[in-house]
Image (cartoon, helix red, strand yellow):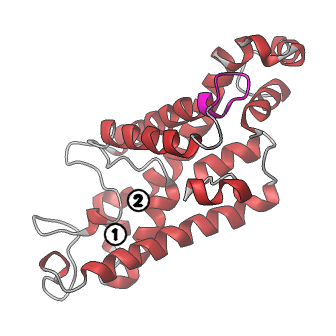
Amino acid sequence: AFALMTIYTASHLNPALSLSFCVVGSLSWSKLLPYCLSQVLGAYVASALVFLMYYGTHDMSPIGGVLAVYGPNETASIFATYPSSFMSHRGSFLDQVVATGMMMLSYLPLADPQNSPASRDLLPLLVGVMFLGVSCSMSSNCGGGVNPARDLGPRLFMLFAGWGTEVFTCYNYWFWVPIVAPMLGALLGSGVYALFIHWHLPGAGQDDLKKKKKCVSFSGCSMKYALSSIMDV
């Protein structure tokens, strides 16, 4: 999907990325809602296709007339993310913030023209490997969501496909964690990259350095200027 659509929309495929692009001025705020809705819709349709492919198998057989969200026969985790039994809401929130922040710290060097950017032909492959690495290394606690659309779209599908409202109420209404936490993680990861790497690159330009001296926090015009120069790809 990244390789197919990057020429048209930069292939965000993730509301957290789209929000970061809006904050730094690389994407119009008027486009944020259409982008996010499209991403959630895409995840919804993908979930429906997976369900249809495996419909009728033992794993998709209803138990007591309802597809299971809990227990040894649960199938809800095939589609959306859920916390491990030992995870609290606070721990889950931190897990998703850190995981998404690491994703951004891995993505930005590949796209930053002042760093060592990958070629346009190679970028989709490297981004795919990066996402795979983050998902495999940080999925034990909460399933490695790092993408609100990837979680909300399938969860909405399950709501109408037989799992019922438990997909939202289970684990003490845990569903909001993989929606909100990745948004914050993406912003923090982008900010850390700008402060500690991008501003110090030889080709960052004098404007970056001048604006950096005016602001030492994550807010203000200097942060917006630095991040927009990174993400204008």
- Position of 230 compared to 39: left or right? right
- Position of 28 compared to 130: left or right? right
Q: Residues within 10 Å of mark 2 (few under 14, many from 20)?
A: many
Magenta-drawn stretch, dominant element (helix, strand or loop): loop
Q: In the rendered image, which residue does mark 2 sit on?
A: 175
Disc 1 and disc 2: Cα gap in Å? Answer: 8 Å
Quadrant showing the N terminus = bottom right
Q: Nearer the viewer, residue 133 or 61?
A: 133
Residue 186 spot, x, y in % from top left = 58, 39
Residue at screen point 72% across, 13% down: 201
Judge whether 216 appears above or below 69 on screen: above
Q: In the rendered image, which residue does mark 1 sit on?
A: 167
SS state under label 2 = helix
Residue 61 spot, x, y in % from top left = 16, 83
SS state under label 1 = helix
Q: Are the residues at dot 1 and dot 2 in contact (C-beta closer than 8 Å)?
A: yes
- Position of 169 compared to 72: left or right? right
In primary-sequence order, the first of circles 1 and 2 is 1
Magenta part of the protein: which range?
A: 109-117
Please count the marks in the image: 2
Instruction: State whether residue 13 appears in this view.
Output: no
Indicate the amino acid at tag 1: Val
